[in-house]
Amino acid sequence: QVQLVESGGGLVQAGGSLRLSCAASGSIFSINAMGWYRQAPGKQREFVARITSGGSTNYADSVKGRFTISRDNAQNMVYLQMNSLKPEDTAVYYCRVDTIPIRYYWGQGTQVTVSS
């Protein structure tokens, strides 16, 4: 089992920045990739960014060039730096961890609201 706790969400004006953090605990030795997803009201949860244990990253097209994912393996943390935020980035952001054997664990989510 892996437990995840997100933090860093909030209210920001369009064009502003926020940094999300996710702390992992529990069976951290099994963690492979770490990532962020988001869910806007009335929409399905969607992929935002992912980083593997080796540091390879990939991003949704909608956030490329604006968001940066990073991880600190020593501290079992993953971060999402969000710049040039837009109102359409408003959503609940969820941290997800992929383990080996393959299982997915989710955090409780943190609200990000971008005002126009």
Image (spheres, grey):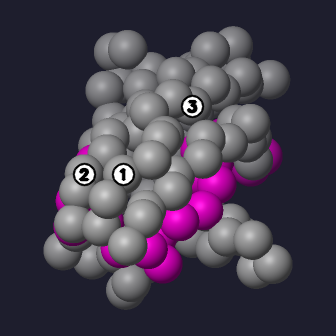
Which numbered circle lies on residue 6?
A: 3
Q: Earlier in the sequence, mark 2 or mark 3?
A: 3
Please say whether residue 52 is visible from this viewpoint.
Answer: no
Residue at numbered disc 1: 12
Query: Which label sits in the foreground, 2 or 3?
Result: 2
Residue at position x 47%, y 41% from top? 10
Region of the chain picked out in magenta, as a range: 81-103
Residue 41, placed above or below residue 94: below
State the image coordinates of residue 7 (x, y, percent, origin top left).
51, 29
Hey, which quadrant is residue 49 in on the image?
Answer: bottom left
Residue 14, placed above or below residue 62: above
Q: Indicate the amino acid at tag 3.
A: Glu
Residue at position x 72%, y 25% from top? 2
State the image coordinates of residue 110 (x, y, percent, origin top left).
61, 41
Which numbered circle lies on residue 17?
A: 2
- Callout 1 touching callout 2 (CB < 8 Å): yes
Q: Earlier in the sequence, mark 1 or mark 3?
A: 3
* Relative side of 29 to 85, left or right: right
Residue at position x 41%, y 39% from top? 20
